[in-house]
Amino acid sequence: MKNEDNFYKALSNLKEIINKTGIKICKVNGGNVSFQDAMKDVKQIKWTKATIIKKPLEKDIFLPKRREEVTMDELLSRNGFLNVINLPEYMEGYVENINPIVMEKLRNGEFSIQDTLDLHGYRKEDARILFENFIQAAIKNKLNCVKIIHGRGLKSKGTPVLKDNLVKWLIKAMNRKWVAAFASCRMCDGGPGATYILLKKRPEKKKISIIK
């Protein structure tokens, strides 16, 4: 009943609206008037570009917390020691006071790998020479992140030969000044059989603290 009352109330001033707007009423006799004749005096309503702006409610506004951003230049300009964590199967090392977000990105493989060296099947000395040349070339070409494939050393007697020696080569005086961080790769990039290396843009001679 309430809806019907509203309907008739809306039509109660129809005559007044017709008089004000000048709308012509066409009487249909026996349904013989065509649609075109019935619509010939219909006027198009002018379009307005006015925009209705609804003020958002405070509860609808969500401002996410701004995550700390670290540029590569900021990371590579930091001073400090290099801490090395060498755990079973997994290993990583990093400049002291490095931003945790940078290490998280490195562990997750979020840095673009710009070059890769595969040391599989090489003797230790041959692998060392290849590594030295590779790192020097990466530094010369101003690369930021590279990957070394050394294998897990499961067939090595005792500890993995290439994997363990990689840490020694990384912290060697001529190399460590260029190393910002390194970490075992994700499984899709080789897992513990490969290592990401993050390089600095400028050399820094600093002491190194090793944790095993």
Image: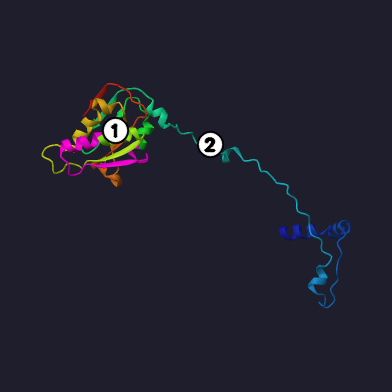
Q: Of discs 1 and 2, which sits in the foreground?
A: 1
Sort mark 1 into few (<14), some (14-19) or many (20+) by Cα contacts within 10 Å.
some
Observer-nearest of 143 and 152: 143
Q: Residue at x 78, y 57 (%)?
A: 45
Q: Could you say where residue 138 lies in the image, as x and y percent from the top left?
A: 32, 35
Magenta stretch holds residue 108:
yes
Observer-nearest of 88 and 92: 92
Amino acid type, mark 2: Leu
Task: Check disc 1 and report its element: helix, strand or loop.
Answer: helix
Question: Quarter holding the N terminus?
Answer: bottom right
Q: Residue at x 36, y 31 (%)?
A: 100
Q: Could you say where residue 81 lies in the image, as x and y percent from the top left?
A: 30, 23
Residue under label 2, please give it.
Answer: 63
Q: Residue at x 26, y 45 (%)?
A: 190
Estimate the spatial distance between the alpha carbons at disc 1 and disc 2, rounded to whole Å.
Answer: 45 Å
Q: Are marks 1 and 2 in contact (CB under 8 Å)?
A: no
Disc marking residue 146: none
Disc marking residue 136: 1
Observer-nearest of 50 and 98: 98
Task: Check disc 2 and report its element: helix, strand or loop.
Answer: loop
The magenta region covers: 106-132
